[in-house]
Image (cartoon, grey):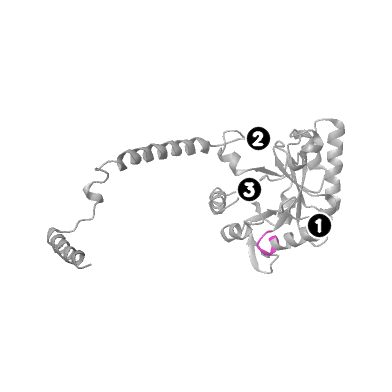
Amino acid sequence: MKKIYNFAGNLSYRNYTIKDLFDNKGKKKLSQINVKNEEETNIALDAKVDLLITGLAAIKKVRSIAKNNFITVAIPFTEFKTNDEILKASLEALNNGADAIYTARSPRVVEYLAKESIPVMAHLGLVPRKSIWIGGLRGVGKTTSEALKLFEEFKTMENAGAFAVEAEVIADQTLKFISENVNLITVSLGSGNYGDVNYLFMDDICGENEQIPRHAFSLAKIYKLRDKIYREKVKAVHKFNKKAKTTKFVTSRNIVKINNAELQKFKKKAKLLNKYN
């Protein structure tokens, strides 16, 4: 653990600093996973995942649990419009415990934030929100011209001041060359084995949905367990519904009893009360 002062000015400890990430580049693979809530954060910690990424609204809760992990916060693409709005949101994230921010916005935005010493992770390759520009959701960097354009984009982000890039669905050998020739931490999401960090979404890892993106894979099938739980619940409620419509709904162990002497006194007093009211 490294001792630091976080961006809020509080003494803290981190499993990785940005310097550590660069020191490990090309030497040691790290893992990153997205977490959205308390349960997912605890799962990531129990599994000893290195790096976490979360949303702006969740960072306080996530940081309260993952006290020492390096955490990146994603700044929503369209929610904050101007540079100053993005800067304000980024500073809020850092004040609430983030170590870096993620944005899929342009190099100009990255440069604007980086000039304030904000660690920025950019996004290149397949950027789903920008997929209208490239003909839909597809792999990137499979031709000479596209790979060269991608390399130039990485260099532009490096020059803008980004410390890392989420590299999504890029041809693996293209990313290998790029990663070896840029001063950036490359976070591979569906881009093969040559990024500095390997990243997947928890939903995909755990098999929360039957259908997952082609570039992802599941190591469990939670959706099957969820379906089984649903069917078991329906079965139980069906039995309840049938039994609730009978005079034998509950057994003696579910019934509160009044002893006979108390019952008779109650009935007698209740009849008198009813008679005079």
Determine the image quadrant of residue 216. Answer: top right
Q: In this figure, which residue is indicated by the disc labeled 1? A: 82
Q: In this figure, which residue is indicated by the disc labeled 2? A: 213
Disc 3: CA contacts within 10 A as few (<14), some (14-19) or many (>=20): many
**Magenta span of residues:** 93-98
Calculate the distance from the C-alpha at mark 2 to the C-alpha at mark 1: 32 Å
Determine the image quadrant of residue 238. Answer: top left
**Between residues 6 and 36, which one lies in front from this camera angle?**
36
> In this rendering, would 47 be left or right of 233?
right
Q: Mark 1 falls on what kind of element? A: loop
Residue type at mark 3: give it: Asn
Residue 128 visible in the displayed image: yes
Asked whether disc 2 touches disc 1, contact meaning CB atoms under 8 Å apart, the reply is no
Where does the image place residue 26, in percent across and percent down from the top left? 74, 44
Residue type at mark 1: give it: Thr
Where does the image place residue 237, in percent across and percent down from the top left? 38, 40
> Which residue does the image show at 85% across and 46% down from the upper left?
155
Calculate the distance from the C-alpha at mark 3 to the C-alpha at mark 1: 26 Å
> Which residue does the image show at 12% across and 61% down from the upper left?
261
Q: Mark 2 falls on what kind of element? A: loop
> In this rendering, would 142 be left or right of 39?
right
Residue 67 visible in the displayed image: no
**Between residues 61 and 100, which one lies in front from this camera angle?**
61
Q: Which part of the image, by quadrant, shows the N terminus? A: bottom right
Disc 2: CA contacts within 10 A as few (<14), some (14-19) or many (>=20): few
Q: In this figure, which residue is indicated by the disc labeled 3? A: 34
Q: Which part of the image, by quadrant, shows the C terminus? A: bottom left
Determine the image quadrant of residue 101. Answer: bottom right
> Which residue does the image show at 75% across and 41% down from the upper left?
127
